[in-house]
Structure formats: C-alpha cells, structure tokens
Image: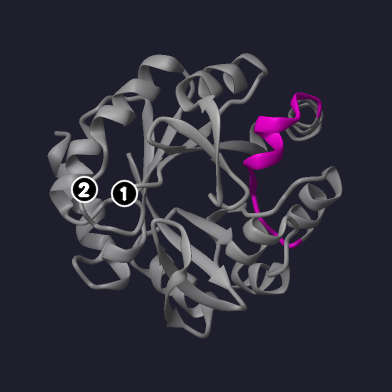
Amino acid sequence: MQVIPAVDISQGECVRLMRGRMDEKTVYSHEPAKVAEKWEAQGAQVLHVVDLDGAIGGRPTNLETVKAIAQAVDCVIELGGGIRTVQDVEAAFSAGVDRVILGTKASEHTDFLLQALSRFGESIIVSIDAREGKLASRGWTETTTIDAYEAARSVQGLGCRRIVFTDIGRDGTMEGPNLASLEKVLKAVSIPVIASGGVGTLADLVCISRLGDGIEGAIVGRALYENKFTLREAIEAVAAGRE
C-alpha cells in the first residue's frame, strides 16, 4: 500500500482543512512546491494535490502552483478540485499532472465521465466523497441523497479504474479512519481504492493496509504536517505491518 502525502492548495499556499471546512483552514507553507520536494525526498511516489479554491468555485484556479509542483518533483501527481469540463482535464495534464480526479461532475453527468474515460483512460480517477454514507459534492459544501457506495459501484460499471474514497467526517481530524466505511466500499467495487480521511497514527495506516489488496494507497495530510510521524516512518510501518 502506498502512503500518499496530501498537498492541498488555497490561494497559492499549502493548507489543511478540518472536515473540508474553508473557515477552518491552517496554512502550512507559502511554497507548495517546496513541500512537494520534501515529501519526495522522504520517499513519496505519489502526491495527492487538491485545488481547494477550484473545488469550491467550480473551476481550477491554482494551476500555476500545480505546474510549479510538477516541475519540482518526479512523483506521480494526481490533481482534483473544480475539474468539470474536458478543457479543464486537458489544462490539468498540460500543467504536468499524471492523473486527474473528477468529483462533482462525474457523479452528476454520466456522459462527461464516459467522455473523459474514453479519452484519458486510467489517468482518470473518480472521487467518492462520503458524508454519513451519502455522496457530497461541490467541494463538500452539499450533500446529496445518493448512496456513496452505490455511486462507487456505478462509476466502476462505467469503466472507471480507480477511485479515491474520503470519509468527510474524519478528514483533517486525525481521529482515525472509518474502517467500516472502507470495508463497505471495498465490497462494492473490485477496482483499486485510495483511502482518505482521519489518519493520525502509524497504527491507523497499518490498519488500512490490512484491509486487503483492494486498498492501493492511503492519503495522509494533517498528521504529516503536524509532525506526528515522518513520511519515511509511515512507509516503513506499512511495509513492516503487512509482512
């Protein structure tokens, strides 16, 4: 299982939110590219980059910062946040990212998702963001009536080859992942799942890794930024925990 550092961007800065709330934002660096270089130096193979302003506003707004990150590191970069047109997807790839994460638009417009999957294949990831089991959208500001696990099953049926599953209630809290919800999504799909939300300790990462081979990676944010452990320690703990 890969340990994937989060690099969340707002107004060109590296930040973390609490449960996705922009009014609970902590700034950790004015130079996100330097943060990305730090994670790469500690062993990151993938970086999870989110344009938070784009997610709220509905269109990418931090692509210059994303481009700087892509130029600074050799990691695989996955980018999400406000990507809702084919042109947005193309702009993200032009900025140097390797994977594009679709959220709101993918869940609301099947035709758009099919078009993106047809053109870009495995480079497209769908984000399934759950609040109490229901799919959330528009930067997590709205909660739908759609069952999140059914949504995961649905996008797999349309040809999606990888999802990011976030439990919003745990995101940024460091209170531990919602293992029950992760187990439920793993039962719903057979494609790789990247887990997100709640990691606060090395033990949390080991628990996620032990859910099975369906878990491809776990995203870690605040715990790294608050120095609860280093990325290198996290990678080593996951390797040891699964032996």
The numbered mark, 1 or 2, whose residue comes first in the sequence reads 1
Asked which secondary structure carries label 1, the reply is: loop
The residue to which callout 2 is attached is: 176
| Residue 25, picture quadrant | bottom left
Q: Is residue 157 left or right of residue 225?
A: right
Q: Position of residue 85 (x, y in %)?
A: 82, 45
Image point (51%, 85%), residue name: 30
Q: Position of residue 140 (x, y in %)?
A: 53, 49
The residue to which callout 1 is attached is: 170
Badge 2, how many Cα within 10 Å: few under 14, some, many 20+?
A: some
Q: Is residue 118 left or right of residue 14?
A: right
- The circle drawn on residue 129 is none
Q: Which quadrant does the C terminus fall into?
A: top left
Residue kind at label 1, given as amino acid type? Arg
Residue kind at label 2, given as amino acid type? Gly
**Image height of 187 relative to 117, above or below:** above
Q: Which quadrant does the N terminus fall into?
A: top left
Q: Position of residue 53 (x, y in %)?
A: 63, 66
Q: Residue furthest right?
A: 87
Mark 1 and mark 2: Cα distance apart in space: 7 Å
Would you say residue 108 sits in the magenta stretch? yes
Residue range in magenta is 95-111
**Image height of 28 relative to 198, above or below:** below
